[in-house]
Image: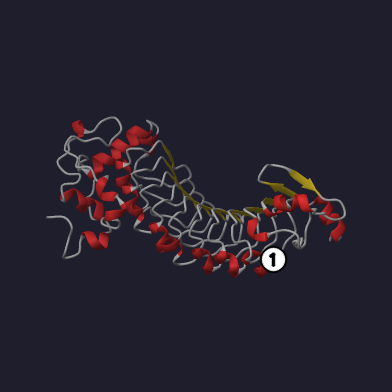
Amino acid sequence: MMCEEQQQQQMRFETRDGRKMNGKNQIKVEEEEDEAMNQLEIVDLRGMNLDSIPINPTINLAAICKLDISNNNLQSIPESLIARLLNLVVLDVHSNQIKFLPNSIGCLSKLKNLNVSGNLLQSLPRTIENCRSLEELNANFNKLSQLPDTIGFELLNLQRLSVNSNKLIFLPHSTSHLTNLRVLDARLNCLRSLPQDLENLINLQVLNVSQNFQYLSVIPYSIGLLLSLVELDVSYNKITALPESIGCLKKLQKLSVEGNPLVSPPLEVFEQGLHVVKQYLCDKINGSSKTSPKKKGWFGRLGKCTTFNGVNVRDVDREGYIMPNYRSIDGLASPRYMGMFSPRRLFSPKSYFSR
């Protein structure tokens, strides 16, 4: 453990004007420097082999907007310290030995970026839901077995959720309510399934659920309503058939499926490129293939409601998506109609669609 004098020598601070101060023996604050200290924004303590966080009494904790204590030997973060960082925007504690986060993290109402990757976390505190300004959460390389059940109901500004290399068995149902989410990385877990109501993730561009190996065998049909999806990685799972709804993903540019025992689409279809794969799946939706089984899923019933019906093979363009008789669902997938395409709602007695 470093002595206090060594810690103070190596502590790095940065003010709003970019001026760096390196203290020797002790940080001396003179009257002319008071204003600069009050404007302290960044505290950089990364890579100092710290076992605990040194707190200098001259530092105005409420003025700090970024705290970087990554790459140390920390096992915990003091509750009292976090509770006083009222204006913190970025908190980086990656690559430590932290086993739990303090409940006071819920006091960080301005926090936008939280990096807790490379620790020993088995769970996240429920109070993290109070960090409603949070835009990026990186919890990769931990021991997480679950996420807070209602995390998606509260973190509505979250744009990037990275939880790869953990022990997650499922993603909470509330995940499907993260309407601003753009990137969801849940690879290298033990996922058995994905939330059924994925259609609410109207801004999702990248979805990676690869390398769940023998656990993940089915992708929900609602994936076909992720209208902003650009990249989909489901490689190295136990998936035997892709949902036909993937054929309706107009913006999809990258599809990774290697390492699966896929039967549908067959290998020869994949060898012809993504646009052929999407056309193949789109043909099956519209019953163009004689070998296509009768639709039993809710997406097949959606076709009966005139959203995808009345389309012949010749009407499908090379992207396998644009159809002259196709009625756009872009407007219906707005937050105003969130959950409208849920199977439970779609086929309830008070259906939103006429038969």
Residue 266 x %, y %:
36, 40
283 horizontally vs 158: left or right: left
User: In the rendered view of the protein, which quadrant contains the C terminus?
Assistant: bottom left
Residue positioned most to the front: 31
Give the residue drawn at x 28%, y 54%: 336
Task: Answer with the quarter of the image where residue 156 lies.
Answer: bottom left
Task: Answer with the quarter of the image where residue 106 lies.
Answer: bottom right
Residue 315 x %, y %:
19, 32
Can residue 124 be seen at all in this image of the molecule? no
- Pick the residue in front: 229 or 208: 229
131 horizontally vs 101: left or right: left
- Pick the residue in front: 310 or 121: 121
Count up the numbered dots: 1
Q: In the rendered view, tell whether residue 37 sits above or below residue 130.
A: above
Residue that numbered label 1 is attached to:
76
Residue 352 x %, y %:
18, 57
241 horizontally vs 210: left or right: left
Residue 46 x %, y %:
73, 51
Give the residue drawn at x 28%, y 58%: 342
- Pick the residue in front: 185 or 138: 138
* Secondary structure category for the residue under label 1: loop
Residue positioned most to the left: 355
Colouring method of the image: secondary structure
**Which amino acid is tagged 1?**
Ser
Can residue 125 be seen at all in this image of the molecule? yes
